[in-house]
Amino acid sequence: MSFSIEHIAIRCRDIEASVDYYSRMFGAKVILRRNLDNSRRIVFLRIGESMLELMHMGPASEPVDSREHYGVHHIGIKTDDFESAYQDLKAKGADFLGEPFEPTPGIRLAFLRDPNGAVIELAKRDPKVFQEAMNKGTVNW
């Protein structure tokens, strides 16, 4: 028996604005729309080989900062061209939470927030650097 993460789901204030955001920012493609009872809707998007589920399920509480509470902290989206992706997202008005940084040479990260408050990590990892870290088992960066 094997397992893999199939998708991540985000509850949305405005599902069409969220579809537009992920399409513009990350080239996401709508692969399925579901209409449930009571005007609740779900839209599945494809981003690369991953799937994102956007859910419009009616009123909800405003989100807390996921970086300060237990539970899901962020969604990681990788890119093969970090600087171009960062500049492109910035030009499109992405809400970055700080400047890009390198926790260690070969790994570039930046965090941004989607319209629903979900935190996204933009990442580029040199496979050799990450493999060396995994071989060590524990690193201090």
Image (tube, rainbow, N blue to C red):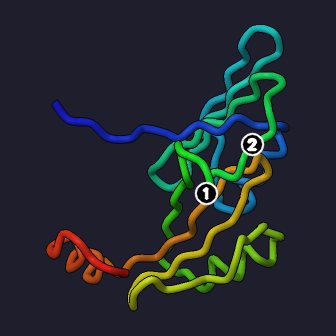
Q: Residue at x 48, y 39 (%)?
A: 7
Q: Amino acid at mark 2?
A: Pro
Q: Note whether 16 is above or below 38 in the view shown.
A: below
The quarter of the image holding the C terminus is bottom left
Measure how far apart labels 2 and 1 are at the Cα level: 11 Å
The quarter of the image holding the N terminus is top left
Q: Secondary structure at mark 1?
A: helix
Q: Secondary structure at mark 2?
A: loop
Q: Amino acid at mark 1?
A: Arg
Q: Position of residue 3 (x, y in %)?
A: 27, 36
Left or right: residue 111 versus residue 97 is: left
Q: Residues within 10 Å of mark 2 (few under 14, many from 20)?
A: few
Q: Relative to the observer, which residue lies in front, 48 or 2?
A: 2
Q: Position of residue 59 (x, y in %)?
A: 84, 25
For disc 2, the marked residue is 63
Q: Residue at x 59, y 37 (%)?
A: 9
For disc 1, the marked residue is 67
Q: Residue at x 39, y 91 (%)?
A: 105
Q: Residue at x 76, y 77 (%)?
A: 90
Left or right: residue 69 versus residue 15 is: left
Q: Position of residue 121 (x, y in %)?
A: 57, 65
Residue furthest top in the image? 37
Q: Write down the quadrant of residue 55 in the picture.
A: top right
On residue 57, which mark appears?
A: none
Q: Note whether 44 is above or below 77 in the view shown.
A: above
Left or right: residue 53 versus residue 127 is: right
Left or right: residue 76 versus residue 139 is: right
Q: Position of residue 134 (x, y in %)?
A: 21, 70
Q: Note whether 105 is above or below 46 in the view shown.
A: below
